Image (cartoon, coloured by chain):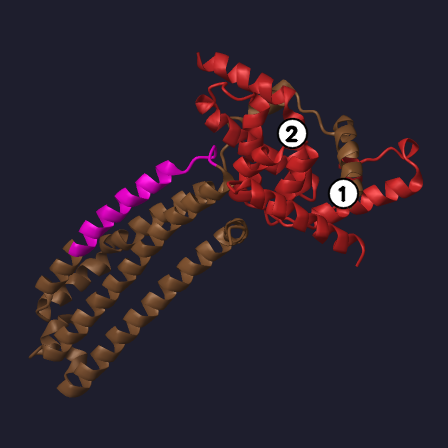
Amino acid sequence: MTDELDLLKKDWQKKEAHLPKLSYSDIHKMIWKKSSSIVKWILIISILEFTLPHLLYLIPSMEEGLKIYDNIGVSNYILVTSIITYVFAIYFIYQFYKRFKEISVLDDSKSLMKKILRTRTTVKHYVIFSLSMIMVTVIIMAIGVFLSDNLADAFPELKEGLKHISEEKLRFTLMLSIGGFGVLLTLFMGGVYFLLYGLLLKKLQKNYKELRQLEF
Amino acid sequence: MKKELEHKFVTELQDNQNIVHKICSLYTNDRESHNDLFQEITIQLWKAYPKFRGEAKFSTWMYRVALNTAITLYRKSKKRISTQDYESVIFKIKADEYDETEEQQLKLMYKAVRQLGDIDKALVFMYLEDKNYTEIAETLGITEVNARVKMNRIKTKLRTILNP
């Protein structure tokens, strides 16, 4: 076998004559093109993941939704949850920036892969945290609905329609829909996240595993 | 200053472009992907160039960036047009230089190497480029002993691919 590989080695050197030859201007044009490396995609997706949950609050209907918190008497708890979320978001963004800066193509392959995966892990933790906060918000709302004395007043625009429904039934329906919405949203965001990164990092993860396995 | 750096880089890359082309030919199956990967490697080399202080040879430094791009950073585009004629252009073997069995053997070998995983290809590539195990180990981030073990395993793997 060694003989065959050496045969290949000899041929390999002769092969140079048949390789494409790019001109100076061909290469010069290339250096100003945009990269489409995995690292760049991770950066773009991560920035989206950091900003999207916060952009949601800018949608007018979401702002109206905030009034409901007031009406069912949970706005203080929601405020605390929001503050915690923002403090952690800043922490995660700082961590992410630090990790991202560490990535260098001049590292050896194993370290490079490790750093990219660590950067991704930071975002993963942020996403898990965000999803948990969504769940916490949903739970607070559900508890608010459960404890609220006058539910129909909490939804002024629905008041007319709600007249015919008994308080108990309304309470139950609301809790169920809030809970259902929370679970669906969490599952959806989680699904999008894992699909996105699963596809993007499949090759990298496989190669990293292969290099790491050599150590055992 | 920037212009000067640009000129120096492009000239050096032009002189050493064979290295990048060889990596592209191992890691891609069609001309379009070949150009794609070449493009990405060029961008990564250019981005890292300010950090290249000239302590190492330009070509040595290139191996690391180019291989890292091929096995870590590069995302294969979805278009998968496998063109047979491309392979015969890149791995063209002049028939008159070899006797037929040798030519046949080489063709099989190239085919087998192309079936290997990304990491294995990197090892074979550096082996074919006459790099020693110290350099192979440093580039990939493994120990020299592990590089040797891995190379032996690849040889066995190639043997099974060739003689199923």
User: Badge 1 is on which residue?
Assistant: A2
Mark 1 residue element = helix
User: Badge 2 is on which residue?
Assistant: B19
Residue that appears at 23% across and 82% down: A173
Subunit of mark 2? B
Q: Main secondary structure of the magenta part?
A: helix
Residue that appears at 70% across and 46% down: B114
- Residue A43 visible in rendering: yes
Instruction: Please rate how many residues cluster around mark 1, counting C-alpha atoms within 10 Å: few if below 14, some from 14 to 19, many from 20.
Output: few
Residue range in magenta is A84-107
Picture quadrant of residue A2: top right
Question: Would you say A181 lies left or right of B68 here?
Answer: left
- Residue A76 versus residue B67: which sits nearer the camera? B67
Percent across and percent down for residue B158 are: 73, 50
- Residue A144 versus residue B103: which sits nearer the camera? B103
- Give the colour of chain B: red
Percent across and percent down for residue A172 are: 20, 83
Question: Which amino acid, by three-letter code, is at mark 2?
Answer: Ile
